[in-house]
Amino acid sequence: EVAAGRIYLVAERLKTRIRQETGLTASAGLASSKLVAKIASDLDKPDGLVIVPHGEEAATLAPLLVRALPGVGPRTAEALAVLGIKTVGQLAMRSQSVLARVFGAEQADNLLRRANGIDNSPVEIPGDPKSISREITLAEDLSDLDELKSQLRPLADHVAWTLRREGFQARCVYIKLRLLPKQRIWRPEGPGFGRLITRRCTLPVPVASAQAVYGAAAKLLEVAAKGTGLGEGKEIVRLLGVGTATLSHVPRYAQEPDAGHGEAQPLHPQQAEDGPLFSRDREHRLDVSVDQIRERYGFDAISFGGPAKRGDSLP
């Protein structure tokens, strides 16, 4: 109780400091694990502070809807509802064998542990990221490659912008696809979620531009289409993601290339099958200009567009 009281005071001081320095309220959760503490922080918003004593984790989580568990999204919640499971307590009482028939043994074990408030993952100080990615669940399932590529563009743009903002370049680009059969009947005893695939490539040099990330991702999408039912029209895409890995630190893009530093030095030779996408100097200048606009007006102030189609008119 003494230790809990001290931790409570630390949490109160953090909340007070956040309010004083930012003018914002913050909610906090105190528990024996990261999982339960995270959930507890959502139980009394805004400006709440919830303590879950050790030994009461499962009882605290039991009345909550399954969506309260991190990692349980709409699709997982839908599959659980088919099994008659709507609350965390109902999930905690369900047998592993029943859950495994729907989700597989590994995910079933993970769901049961979290439903019972069990989380042994350590609290770690954040280090450099291993990867930077962006993904979306599509509002409508897609199979057309041109439409999928148009969805890739803003994802690649956001990933590249994050790379530059954090001071990284990447040697590896990858895409993630969740594929579903075009003709399908979902059954509770089956997986019901299609299959998740990734395709990746290693670039000859590190990159951090939207054009370079998108160019690699678009080619990977074409490769994935040829090697799956997507290219034959037998599968459709539900989830689409773009990511980068093998990150290395680089100086931030803070100044124009010729702002007192002489001629800009080439950053990387980004090549496509039909020649360079951009000259290195032009690509760097474009990155700098885009970043300056977004720093001042926000990310959505400018977007990465594709080539104009015949018949399109400029404003």
Image: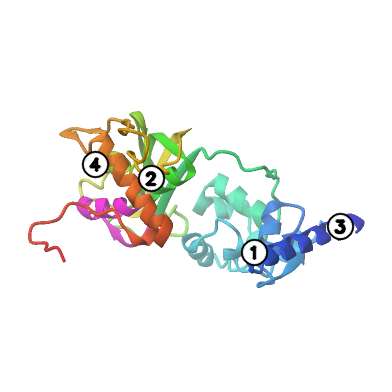
Q: Is residue 279 above or below residue 49?
A: above
Instruction: Indicate left or right for 81 with 301 as reference.
Output: right
Q: Residues within 10 Å of mark 1 (few under 14, many from 20)?
A: many
First along the sequence among labels 4 and 2: 2
Numbered badge on residue 13: none
Q: Does residue 220 appear anywhere in the picture?
A: no
Instruction: Tell me whether the residue at label 1 lies in contact with that at label 4, contact meaning CB atoms closer than 8 angstroms.
Output: no
Q: Does residue 47 appear anywhere in the picture?
A: yes
Numbered badge on residue 6: 3
Q: CA distance from mark 4 to mark 2?
A: 20 Å
- Amino acid beneath label 1: Val
Seen at 92% across and 57% down, the residue is 2
Numbered badge on residue 160: 2
Near-viewer residue (305 or 172): 305
First along the sequence among labels 1 and 4: 1
Q: Name the residue that disc number 1 marks.
A: 88
Q: Nearer the viewer, mark 4 or mark 2?
A: 2
Judging from the image, what secondary structure is the residue with disc 3 in? helix
Instruction: Tell me whether the residue at label 1 lies in contact with that at label 3, contact meaning CB atoms closer than 8 angstroms.
Output: no
Q: Nearer the viewer, mark 4 or mark 3?
A: 3
Q: How is the image coloured?
A: rainbow
Q: CA distance from mark 1 to mark 3?
A: 30 Å
Judging from the image, what secondary structure is the residue with disc 2 in? helix
- Amino acid beneath label 3: Arg
